[in-house]
Image (cartoon, helix red, strand yellow):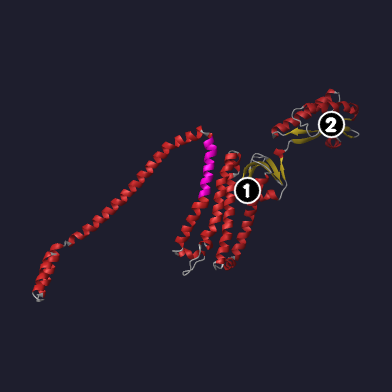
Amino acid sequence: MSPGLSYRSFSWSSDGKVDKSGASEVSASSIGSDVDVSNSGGIGNDWTDKVKEAWQSAVDAVTYSEQKAKEISAEMTPYAQQLLDSHPYLKNVVVPIGWTLTGTVVAWVVMPRLLRRFHKYSLQTPAALLYGGTSGERISYEKSIWGALEDPIRYAITFMAFSQIAVMVAPTTIASQYIAQAWRGAVILSFVWFLHRWKTKSEACGVAVQSILTVGGIGGVATAFAAKDVLGNVLSGLSMQFSKPFSLGDTIKAGAVEGQVVEMGLTTTSLLNAEKFPILVPNSLFSSQAIVNKSRAQWRAMVSKIPVTVDDVEKIPQISNDIKSMLKSNPNIYLGKEAPYCYLSRIESSFAELTLGCNLKQMSKNELYSTEQDILLQSVRIIKEHGARLGITSSQGYSDNAGK
């Protein structure tokens, strides 16, 4: 820059009389002597290299931090688990209550502020048109989609947080059977509540929700029919969770369906039939059918008929008393409701009939069959001990004569 400055000072001293050709020569020479145009590409490459180095340094720092965090977590996890195992009160009480308080604070303090920030940001983007705004209108938070989300999400999170108290009270039964289903029900109800609030607020903002529903009327009707079955199954599932007509492991019968309950879901229930084939039953079936829970019965009735010959009718009173005594002494017979009985119930020309009955205690199917078999064998032995013989019924006699 010094030659140019000296030339300008000379031009002022010469009263503006300057040789223009000389000025151009001086300017060109000065520029050529001070700036190296060939090095401009080198400067750009230096900046690119510096940016790449900075980016790589940032990536390395994040990777190193993540690796250190994993190492610290791996080192601290055994100590934390040991602390929880050595202090059951901390594991069973403090942790659930801590989750409850944290979830409540998030639902009632943190989450509303986040939704308001999302609303403020969305007003600056074209997304504002999706929930009632126009290019020249700024809708309030209370009438926006974020305002419609606030209460459903708030109460859903609060319910999930306080359900940890139920886990603390009954960690095995409630946690394994009902918590997941209750959470799914809470999410579904919150979503339906949000849709209702959003529809109401959108109509208040001037959005033609009714017109949209009219245009999609056919699809809406089809969706309603499909949702009717799903909603019916969900409501039936929730009803069964409260009424508890059966539990896992129970053997039930509902209409033509019979089997052992292996899984209870929010919309369906899984059974195993007698052949051990899985059966998936919609929960709405149980609301329209009578449910027989065989596993909850304290006893099961047994009634049998034994024919004897007519010639041994005089021996029947003593036989009947001995059979009743045998039934009362059987440990598998339930005596709390009614006493066992045995009496002469029928007399024909060719045979007489003894009817015996009792209530058997709740037991497995194999034990039940074995007990019934033992009772019949002991009854026949008592009949033979008194010198009586088994008779032949009329139907058996007719079939034998037809065979001859």
10 Å neighbourhood of mark 2: few (<14), some, or many (≥20)?
many
- Is residue 1 something one can see in this rendering? yes
Q: Callout 1: 10 Å neighbours few (<14), some, many (20+)?
A: many
Residue at 51% x, 59% y is: 146
Q: Which mark is residue 120?
A: none
What residue is drawn where x is 31% and y is 51%?
55
Mark closer to the chain start, 1 or 2: 1
Query: Which residue corresponds to the image point at 57% horizontal and 60% vertical from the top-left?
Result: 197
Dot 2 falls on a residue whose secondary structure is strand
* Residue 306 x %, y %: 83, 32
Q: Is residue 241 above or below residue 395?
A: below
> Compared with residue 297, is residue 31 higher up or lower down, i.e. above or below?
below
Which quarter of the picture shows residue 367? top right
Quarter holding residue 226: bottom right
Q: Secondary structure at mark 1?
A: strand
- Residue 383 appears left or right of 267: right
Quick one: quadrant of the C terminus? top right
Against 126, residue 251 (above or below) is above
Left or right of 65 on screen, residue 17: left
Kindly identify which residue carries mark 1: 268
User: Which residue is rendered at x = 52% and y = 37% of the image?
Assistant: 91
Q: Is residue 36 magenta?
A: no
Question: In terms of depth relative to the viewer, which is nearer, 174 or 124?
Answer: 124
Amino acid marked by disc 2: Cys
Residue closer to the observer: 378 or 99: 99
Residue pointed to by mark 2? 342
Q: Mark yes or no: residue 279 visible.
A: no
Inter-mark Cα distance, 1 to 2: 45 Å
**Residue type (three-letter) at the residue carrying disc 1:** Thr
**Which residues, given as a range, are shown in magenta?**
89-105
Image quadrant holding the N terminus, namely bottom left
In the rendered image, residue 93 lying in the magenta stretch gets the answer yes
